């Protein structure tokens, strides 16, 4: 069934969030702060391992770097585009709208939790590739694995940051269903090189999300999102 993978992913995010809310009620504040740090460390390691996978190669028994120029151009150009559009402000406005519509105006952490979780679960390559596989063949195995990982991570996030992280299922669902529906159009562009570049830069952005979890407000991560599309575009230019 086309689209089933995203439905499963959404269900696992909601299930993980509900578990986090249930456990969070019985946690002391210092434990919640520690779990916040743990969430940041987990996301940092996920981003770092993904970036290193594409940045480091073994040549004649020695470790060398590859693609630094593509990464630099993508991140700088993406940051400029993102700042001009100010995606961070628009995503914050959407987060505030969700907070108001769900009756959580009294939760000061809601929007930050919503944005952080949303970026964590939508920036990675698994969601893009899994959605394309789901749209073309109905194979939802990649999205199932992603959903399990998302469910575990969001459980920790909700426990420490609050229910704002729960509603990250909204942008996850919208993004992945759009990609699934457009799979026949997007698939020709998803060459192995384009996938590698997307994964490379996407992993760096996930690393940035981890930094923001540990040191909130240091990076306007949403304004870096265009870097992913710049990286894919450079695939066909370089």
Image (cartoon, rainbow, N blue to C red):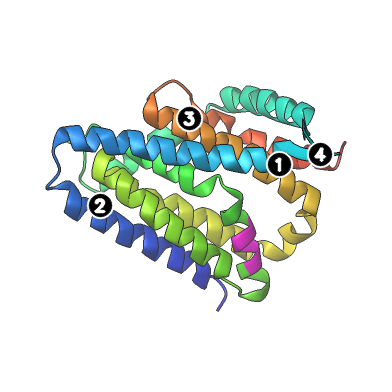
Whether the residues at callouts 2 and 4 have beta carbons within 8 Å, the answer is: no
Q: x, y (%) of residue 59?
A: 84, 39
Residues in magenta? 129-133
Disc on the earlier residue, 2 or 4: 2
Neighbourhood count class around disc 3 (C-alpha, 10 Å): few under 14, some 14–19, many 20 upward: some
Which disc, if any, is residue 20? 2
Mark 4 vs mark 3, CA separation in Å: 43 Å
Prevailing secondary structure class for the magenta stretch in the rendered image: helix
Q: Which mark is residue 54?
A: 1
Q: Secondary structure at mark 3?
A: helix
Q: Residue furthest bottom?
A: 1
Cα–Cα gap, marks 1 and 3: 27 Å
Q: Nearer the viewer, mark 2 or mark 3?
A: 2
Asked whether residue 202 appears in the rendered view, the answer is: no
Looking at the rendering, in which quadrant would you find the N terminus?
Answer: bottom right
- Which mark sits nearer the N-terminus, 1 or 3? 1
Residue 238 position by quadrant: top right
Secondary structure of residue under mark 1: helix
Which x, y percent locates residue 158? 28, 46
Of tags 1 and 3, which is closer to the observer?
A: 1
- Which is nearer the eye, 68 or 170? 68
> Which label's residue is closer to the chain start, 4 or 3?
4
> Which mark identifies residue 61?
4
Of residues 40 and 92, the one nearer the viewer is: 40
Front label number (1 vs 4)? 4
Residue at the image position 38 percent from the left and 65 percent from the top: 11
At 78% across and 27% down in the image, what residue appears? 69
């Amino acid at each position: 069934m086309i689209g089933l993978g995203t439905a499963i992913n959404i269900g696992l995010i909601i299930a993980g969030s509900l578990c986090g809310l249930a456990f969070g009620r019985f946690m002391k504040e210092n434990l919640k702060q520690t779990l916040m740090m743990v969430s940041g460390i987990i996301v940092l390691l996920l981003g770092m391992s993904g970036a290193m996978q594409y940045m480091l190669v073994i040549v004649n028994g020695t470790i060398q770097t590859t693609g630094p120029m593509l990464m630099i151009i993508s991140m700088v150009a993406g940051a400029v585009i993102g700042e001009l559009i100010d995606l961070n402000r628009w995503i914050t406005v959407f987060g505030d709208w969700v907070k108001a519509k769900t009756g959580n105006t009294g939760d000061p952490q809601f929007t930050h939790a919503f944005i952080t979780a949303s970026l964590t679960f939508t920036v990675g390559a698994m969601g893009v590739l899994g959605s394309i596989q789901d749209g073309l063949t109905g194979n939802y195995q990649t999205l199932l694995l992603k959903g399990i990982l998302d469910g575990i991570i969001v459980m920790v996030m909700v426990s420490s940051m609050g229910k704002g992280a729960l509603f990250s299922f909204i942008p996850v669902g919208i993004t992945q269903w759009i990609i699934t529906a457009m799979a026949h159009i997007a698939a020709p562009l998803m060459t192995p090189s384009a996938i590698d570049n997307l994964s490379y830069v996407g992993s760096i952005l996930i690393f940035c999300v981890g930094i923001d979890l540990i040191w909130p407000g240091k990076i306007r991560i949403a304004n870096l999102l265009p870097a992913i599309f710049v990286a894919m575009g450079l695939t066909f230019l370089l």
